[in-house]
Image (cartoon, rainbow, N blue to C red):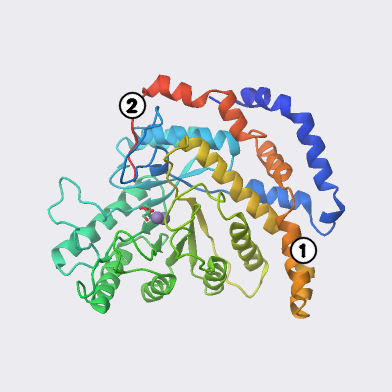
């Protein structure tokens, strides 16, 4: 859909204005301390994975309103991520969810991924729903279940996920458990934890040595009295017991209101255990809204911790896998994902613009106001020209969303796949 020539045509009317704005920003005396070309390069290098389950509209308990032209097969999903990647050059990978995305035609999928310039980022297991062919039910848990037969089925499912992932060169297994209890007394809290640890160890043992297991936490839902892995402390304890290939995954929506997520991020980086991110926006809980739509300052502060840790020699160097984990009920899913990536890059750009030397001085001198002002200066900078420059230099669209609409992408997808095609997902 978006050949280089088509992108050049779409960029043409925006080019002169973009160049003026970019130059103005790059020359701004306020950014005297910053290395703007290096910032743009870092934006070009930054990649965030797209979840296969977010390419269609999500359902709430009350209804689902299909966008039309939703991807029904794994091939279609790769096609959709290919569209995002062509436009922003920052979405070069896709996360799979089994059993929704069981790969069938491996050579065909490999070829398609290559054509689109994509890789498979991670494979997510699903032990929060019962599948038709399965013999044991997850109604009362999976890896933590009291019945060994249920645990074994859930362990085997996770091992199967790794095997599917290996066929497409993935290297990460993400485990999110819905396990927990709805009422006091329902479950023995400590034993449920120990059973989970034992089950995860069996999966960990079966994983190839170059794979990473990401252990995600969530304070509530679907269980409302206790979740077996409710917080980062529990995730961290599990990872420490498992080994170095186990890492904590922070999903921004999986915190109680007002949690200082940036501090959690800083701590996990310091312990060398921050393995991955699920970006989304949240007003109340696991709302899975567009990243940065509700709390852009918090997103900036999170990136501030990441950038700071990356510069600090005393913090273990580690690869953090970035992914979006969102759901789209009223927006076009692809437009929402373009917005999310744009907001993520903007927050990252602002964090890269923080005058770190000045901030360190202000912190040492306990100059509270100056320290805060330094962060505000970076946060209030209009970084859109820098993000656009990164898109452009990487071969994408100056404004991905504008190009998406100008090209009539959704209309074309509806023509190809039909008005009622529905994607698998949450
Ligand atoms: C459920 O809360 C959830 O949103 C988790 O964040 C997982 O990462 C995702 O579903 C996919 O399983
Ligand atoms: Mn998640
Ligand atoms: Mn979630």
Judge from the rendering whether residue 355 lies leftward or rightward of residue 401; answer left or right: right
Asked which secondary structure carries label 1, the reply is: loop
Residue placed under numbered mark 1 in the picture: 355
Residue sitting at 69 percent across and 28 percent down?
11
Judge from the rendering whether residue 311 lies leftward or rightward of residue 54; answer left or right: right
Q: Crowdedness of circle 1 by 10 Å Cα count: few (<14), some, many (20+)?
A: some
Q: Crowdedness of circle 2 by 10 Å Cα count: few (<14), some, many (20+)?
A: few
Residue sitting at 42 percent across and 42 percent down?
54
Residue placed under numbered mark 2 in the picture: 420
| Quadrant in which ligand 3 is drawn | bottom left
- From mark 2 to mark 1, how far is it between C-alphas? 51 Å
Residue sitting at 76 percent across and 71 percent down?
369
Occupied quadrant, residue 103: top left
With respect to residue 426, does 235 lie above or below?
below
Judge from the rendering whether residue 40 lies leftward or rightward of residue 218; answer left or right: right
Percent position of residue 373, x then y? 76, 65
Percent position of residue 252, x then y? 49, 59
Occupied quadrant, residue 402: top right
In the image shown, does 177 or 258 lie closer to the viewer? 258
Residue sitting at 43 percent across and 58 percent down?
285
């Amino acid at each position: 859909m978006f050949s280089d020539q088509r992108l050049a045509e779409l960029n043409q009317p925006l080019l002169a204005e973009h160049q003026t704005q970019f130059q103005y920003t790059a020359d701004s005396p306020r950014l005297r301390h910053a290395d703007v070309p290096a910032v743009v390069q870092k934006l070009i290098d930054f990649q965030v994975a797209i979840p296969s389950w977010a390419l269609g509209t999500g359902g709430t308990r009350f209804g689902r309103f299909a966008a039309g032209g939703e991807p029904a097969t794994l091939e279609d999903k790769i096609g959709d991520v290919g569209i995002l990647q062509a436009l922003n050059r920052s979405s070069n990978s896709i996360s799979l969810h089994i059993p929704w995305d069981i790969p069938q035609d491996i050579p065909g999928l490999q070829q398609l991924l290559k054509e689109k310039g994509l890789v498979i980022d991670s494979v997510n297991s699903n032990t929060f729903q019962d599948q038709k062919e399965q013999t044991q039910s997850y109604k009362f848990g999976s890896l933590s279940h009291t019945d060994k037969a249920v645990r074994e089925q859930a362990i085997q499912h996770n091992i199967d996920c790794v095997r599917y992932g290996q066929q497409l060169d993935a290297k990460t297994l993400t485990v999110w458990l819905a396990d927990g209890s709805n009422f006091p007394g329902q479950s023995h809290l400590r034993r449920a934890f120990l059973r989970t640890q034992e089950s995860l160890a069996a999966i960990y043992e079966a994983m190839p040595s170059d794979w990473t297991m990401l252990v995600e936490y969530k304070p509530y839902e679907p269980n409302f009295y206790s979740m077996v892995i409710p917080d980062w402390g529990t995730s961290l304890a599990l990872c420490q017991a498992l080994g170095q290939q186990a890492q904590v995954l922070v999903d921004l929506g999986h915190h109680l209101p007002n949690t200082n997520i940036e501090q959690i991020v800083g701590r996990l980086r310091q312990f060398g255990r921050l393995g991955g991110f699920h970006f989304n926006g949240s007003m109340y809980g696991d709302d899975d809204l567009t990243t940065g739509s509700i709390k852009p300052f918090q997103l900036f502060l999170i990136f501030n911790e990441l950038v700071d840790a990356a510069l600090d020699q005393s913090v273990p160097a580690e690869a953090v896998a970035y992914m979006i984990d969102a759901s789209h009920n009223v927006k076009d899913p692809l437009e929402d994902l373009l917005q999310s990536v744009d907001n993520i890059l903007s927050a990252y750009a602002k964090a890269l613009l923080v005058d770190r030397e000045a901030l360190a001085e202000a912190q040492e001198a306990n100059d509270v106001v100056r320290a805060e002002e330094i962060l505000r200066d970076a946060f209030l900078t209009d970084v859109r020209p820098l993000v656009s420059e990164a898109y452009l230099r990487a071969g994408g669209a100056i404004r991905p969303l504008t190009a998406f609409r100008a090209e009539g992408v959704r209309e074309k997808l509806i023509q190809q796949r039909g008005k009622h095609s529905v994607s698998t997902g949450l």
